[in-house]
């Protein structure tokens, strides 16, 4: 089974979400007491009762024309035509939606685009947005469709999406348009279906979700699509089908996991309608079923060919039945072209349990965990100074007191002596431009959580006034936004004062403007894309910005960044590389830039390809580094921080005169692994280290500038507390120079209030893997800081010994048993267990721990300089699974989110016993998530005064406990 797809770029998700609609819900004053009618099932745009040139029910039309001929559903349609980037071209309509009676809306619309270019701000692309409003017209959440800049062409295309409705919804306001892009967008035939909220959800026996391909934006929802497989219109007696045709990217393929585990079924009955034209006579396309074990790996010898198609034929129904082999847990259905000739269309795919279809009955979009007895997670408004959660004693203030960060013996070191190792977090744009009071609060919290580095990336993302690096009022990007820079200055000063270094990324999401003198500004990817590495104009602009940013004096520190030892390192680019041409090259390198690169390659003795890309990137890096060194930039400089792992790309990152590798480690579980084991602890390949090894170079420092799991759009994975501990244990064992977690966003303001985008008000941007929206992530930071900042990695180990160890087989991280999904951490200052312990007692250096949850993390850290054996107090943290209220998946494979949930977070109760083998009088207290005591905890003495056991009984809504010894 071959499973491939586009790598997911997390920065893109951030910018799409922040692309605000110009049609604010309060743009049209309405009485909140009015009960508004619901939407029509079909709006064909054929009626204009008042003759104002705008179809009935719509308002705030901008750059919109009601055309009378050429529509898809009827003669009329709406055309948006904007000659300039940045114009808020669109139209809106409002309608009533009762969230108590409606769980979701399914929105469908016909579209076609022509000559579209992105606008001057991030997120200014053709899209549809729907804002759900509650009491007093307060925004509750936002749903989006698109952007369609590169996915919809000049032919009418149907897009359709299911969007969850918050229970408190009364009204909705929907906007569609170019949203600031240049070009034209036509739309017609809007449909809005309200899905009722029932106590007993509808059931189905079809184990394939969206088997009729009606849902798609425009790629079919809940399917994995490779190599240009696409929805077509119409289908077999329906509006939509799926076509596998000719492709320049490879043979088209589409696959999906069945909605339920299959081990209880004797066989599976498969049915589909199919149409073919010009297929190879010996079989040019077909359908297969793959059976997988719990780890998501195909079971050898169980692949089953279900159907083979050749020649040409009209729509027909084909059926097949396949037995479920012993040991199979999951199954994957795949349709694939096996030859470049011809095309095949597929529709109405069904897979049912056989012989009794009812054995596979299930409720689509309503797969949830049983959280009836889970406890509410208290929010965290601050970290109280001096509390057990305050580990700021690990962070030496001010940052830079040990001199500049430099490179010594292949590692980061301080100029005045000592190893420079960083436990950090990145800021998601625009979190670097906080108001001063919020910046101070953030700096306090991070220092007390043991964070000693903040990575500043995506500063150049164009999000609006006071929230971006560049002046939003100009038609070029030559000047900085002074208000935003004042905020950035304050943040850097606040971080420095508390001992927190900063790492700076110079270019990643910059959107060039029409007066920058850059051709095709609206077609260039953010940051300039691959062209940034060879185009002389782009390179000149990049270098000018770098000089200005690093040479600008901070009004609060009195230093330029290049002269401030609080700057740890500089990274030239973020997720920009010539190797990105492997995916969608026409989008990555438009028009004359592609011609310019071909011209460069023609003069290269080795021709084009990977070696040429590597050489070109090395040339760019050298020019930039030499120029910055000439400006007296002293800190280490990295090339591009990227998720890529190509051998030639990775080799280029260590090319002189670069000083270090700045990596992005986005761990992704096996595509179809059982959700119960969707954690790095079960990784047979080394988890994060599997990717890190491909970018390590002898004598070159290695920093993970951003890491997190890829959660397929979910707010986070429920088992991520364990992944946190494994990540830091791996970083220590492999002797990484920095481990930086993605990422703090501007919402939720109150940490742990809910998943990002679900608290309402301004918090409507639904982003995955936001650290301050993941209480089971930031709750572990004090323990991770203890491990990263004070436990020695491998004293006395040389680079050659370290390199030999890194080549050893995976799974050798101390205390990690990937075959059993468990981890034990045993150091002088931090000890704990994580994963699936099976109720077994684990004895560590000074602690004994046992828990009877299927999954849990229990860890203890000495508060203060002394080790656990003699410490006066300990911070004990116990976490199992964490989920938002109302969270649900589409099916039991748990790959796609049906409902993102809402506040509050819920925590699975933990039952554990934590024994501290330390003489003295031991007491314990439950803590809230600010670190304050909320009451005494049960303690049982050990025999002969050998210590005491903290009893965690699963009844207290807390993550943290304090143990004291006198």
Image: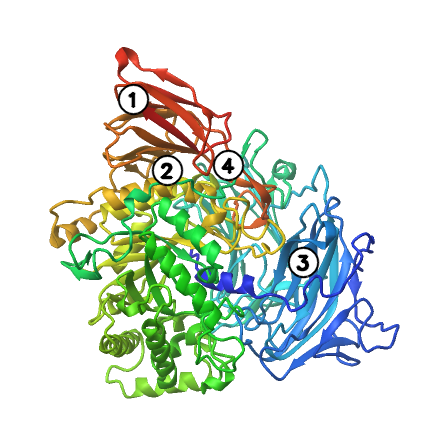
Number of the front mark, 4 or 2: 2
Q: Is residue 617 visible?
A: yes
- Determine the image quadrant of residue 839: top left
Residue 765: x percent and y percent? 57, 57
- Looking at the picture, tell me which residue is in the foreground, 284 or 362: 362
Circle nearer the N terminus (4, 3): 3
Residue annotated with mark 1: 966
Compared to residue 287, the image places residue 329 above or below, namely above
Quadrant assignment for the N terminus? bottom left
The residue labelled by disc 2 is 386
Residue at numbered disc 4? 263
Q: Is residue 234 visible?
A: no
Q: Who comes first in sequence, dot 4 or dot 1?
A: 4
**Which numbered disc, 4 or 1, marks the residue closer to the eye?**
1
Viewer-side residue, 908 vs 158: 908
Q: Is residue 812 left or right of residue 138?
A: left
Callout 4 crowding tier (Cα within 10 Å): few <14, some 14–19, many ≥20: some
């Amino acid at each position: 089974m071959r499973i491939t797809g586009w790598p997911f770029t997390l920065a893109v998700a951030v910018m799409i979400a922040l692309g605000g609609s110009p049609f604010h819900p309060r743009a049209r004053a309405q009485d909140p007491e009015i009960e508004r009618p619901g939407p029509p099932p079909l709006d064909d745009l054929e009626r204009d009762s008042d003759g104002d040139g705008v179809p009935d029910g719509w308002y705030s039309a901008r750059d919109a024309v009601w055309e009378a001929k050429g529509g898809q559903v009827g003669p009329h349609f709406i055309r948006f035509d904007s000659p300039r980037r940045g114009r808020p071209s669109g139209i809106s309509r409002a309608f009533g939606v009762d969230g108590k009676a409606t769980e979701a809306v399914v929105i469908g619309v016909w579209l076609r685009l022509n000559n579209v270019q992105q606008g001057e701000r991030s997120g200014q692309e053709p899209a549809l947005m729907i804002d759900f409003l509650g009491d007093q017209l307060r925004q509750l959440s936002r749903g989006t469709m698109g952007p369609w800049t590169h996915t919809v062409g000049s032919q009418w295309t149907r897009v359709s999406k299911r969007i969850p409705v918050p229970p408190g919804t009364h009204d909705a306001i929907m906007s569609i348009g170019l949203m600031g892009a240049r070009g034209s967008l036509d739309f017609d035939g809007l449909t809005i279906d309200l899905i009722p909220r029932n106590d007993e959800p509808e059931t189905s026996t079809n184990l394939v979700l969206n088997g009729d391909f009606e849902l798609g934006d425009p790629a079919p929802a809940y399917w994995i699509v490779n190599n240009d497989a696409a929805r077509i219109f119409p289908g077999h007696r329906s509006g939509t089908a799926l076509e596998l045709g000719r492709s320049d990217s490879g043979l088209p393929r589409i696959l999906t996991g069945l909605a339920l585990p299959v081990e209880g079924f004797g066989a599976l009955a498969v049915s589909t309608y199919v149409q073919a034209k010009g297929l190879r006579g010996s079989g040019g396309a077909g359908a297969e079923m793959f059976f997988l074990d719990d780890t998501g790996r195909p079971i050898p010898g169980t692949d089953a060919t279900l159907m083979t198609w050749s020649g040409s034929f009209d729509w027909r129904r084909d059926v097949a039945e396949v037995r479920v082999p012993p040991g199979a847990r999951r199954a994957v259905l795949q349709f694939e072209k096996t030859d470049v000739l011809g095309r095949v269309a597929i529709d109405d795919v069904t897979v049912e349990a056989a012989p009794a279809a009812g054995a596979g009955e299930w409720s689509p979009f309503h797969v949830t965990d049983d959280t009836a007895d889970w406890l509410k997670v208290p929010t965290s408004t601050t970290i109280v100074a001096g509390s057990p959660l305050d580990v700021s004693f690990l962070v030496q203030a001010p940052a830079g007191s040990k001199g500049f960060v430099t490179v010594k013996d292949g590692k980061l070191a301080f100029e005045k002596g000592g190893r420079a190792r960083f436990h950090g977090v990145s800021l998601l744009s625009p979190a670097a431009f906080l108001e001063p009071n919020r910046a101070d609060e953030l700096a306090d919290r991070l220092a007390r959580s043991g964070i000693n580095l903040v990575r500043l990336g995506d500063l150049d993302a164009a999000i609006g006034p006071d929230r971006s690096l560049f002046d939003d009022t100009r038609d070029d990007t030559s000047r900085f936004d002074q208000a935003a820079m004042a905020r950035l200055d304050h943040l850097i000063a606040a971080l420095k004062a508390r001992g927190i270094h900063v790492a700076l990324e110079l270019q990643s999401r910059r959107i060039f403007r029409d007066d920058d003198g850059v051709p095709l500004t609206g077609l260039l990817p953010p940051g300039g894309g691959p062209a940034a590495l060879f185009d002389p104009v782009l390179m000149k602009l990049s270098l000018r910005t770098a000089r200005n940013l690093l040479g600008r004096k901070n009004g609060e520190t009195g230093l330029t960044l290049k002269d401030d030892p609080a700057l740890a390192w500089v990274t030239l680019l973020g997720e920009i590389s010539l190797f990105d041409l492997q995916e969608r090259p026409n989008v990555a390198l438009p028009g004359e830039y592609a011609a310019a690169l071909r011209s460069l390659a023609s003069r290269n003795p080795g021709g084009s390809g990977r070696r040429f890309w590597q050489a070109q990137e090395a040339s760019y890096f050298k020019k930039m580094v030499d120029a910055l060194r000439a400006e007296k930039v002293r800190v280490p400089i990295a090339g591009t921080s990227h998720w890529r792992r190509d051998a030639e790309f990775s080799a280029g990152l260590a090319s002189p005169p670069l000083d270090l590798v700045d990596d992005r480690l986005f761990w992704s579980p096996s595509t179809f692994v059982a959700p119960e084991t969707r954690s790095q602890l079960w990784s047979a390949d080394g988890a994060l280290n599997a990717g890190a090894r491909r970018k390590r170079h002898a004598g070159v420092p290695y920093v993970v500038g951003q890491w997190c799991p890829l959660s397929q759009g979910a707010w986070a994975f429920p088992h991520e507390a364990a992944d946190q501990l494994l990540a830091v244990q791996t970083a220590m064992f492999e002797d990484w120079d920095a481990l930086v977690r993605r990422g703090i966003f501007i919402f939720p303001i109150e940490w742990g209030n809910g998943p990002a985008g679900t608290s309402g008000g301004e918090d409507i941007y639904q982003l995955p893997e936001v650290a301050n929206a993941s209480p089971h992530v930031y709750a572990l930071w004090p323990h991770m800081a203890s491990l990263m900042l004070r436990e020695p990695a491998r004293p006395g180990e040389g680079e050659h010994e370290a390199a030999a160890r890194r080549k050893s087989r995976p799974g050798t991280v101390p205390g990690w048993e990937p075959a059993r999904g468990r981890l034990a951490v045993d150091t002088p200052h931090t000890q704990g267990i994580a994963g699936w312990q099976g109720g077994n007692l684990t004895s560590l250096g000074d602690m004994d721990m046992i828990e009877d949850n299927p999954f849990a993390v229990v860890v203890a850290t000495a508060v203060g300089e002394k080790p656990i054996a003699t410490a006066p107090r300990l911070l004990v943290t116990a976490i199992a699974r964490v989920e938002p209220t109302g969270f649900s998946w589409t099916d039991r494979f748990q790959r796609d989110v049906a409902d993102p949930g809402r506040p509050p977070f819920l925590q699975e109760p933990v039952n554990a016993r934590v024994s501290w083998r330390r003489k003295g009088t031991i007491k314990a207290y439950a803590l809230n998530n600010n670190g304050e005591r909320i009451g005494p905890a049960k303690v049982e003495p050990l025999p002969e005064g050998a210590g005491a056991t903290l009893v965690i009984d699963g009844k207290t809504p807390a993550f943290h406990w304090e143990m004291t010894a006198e």
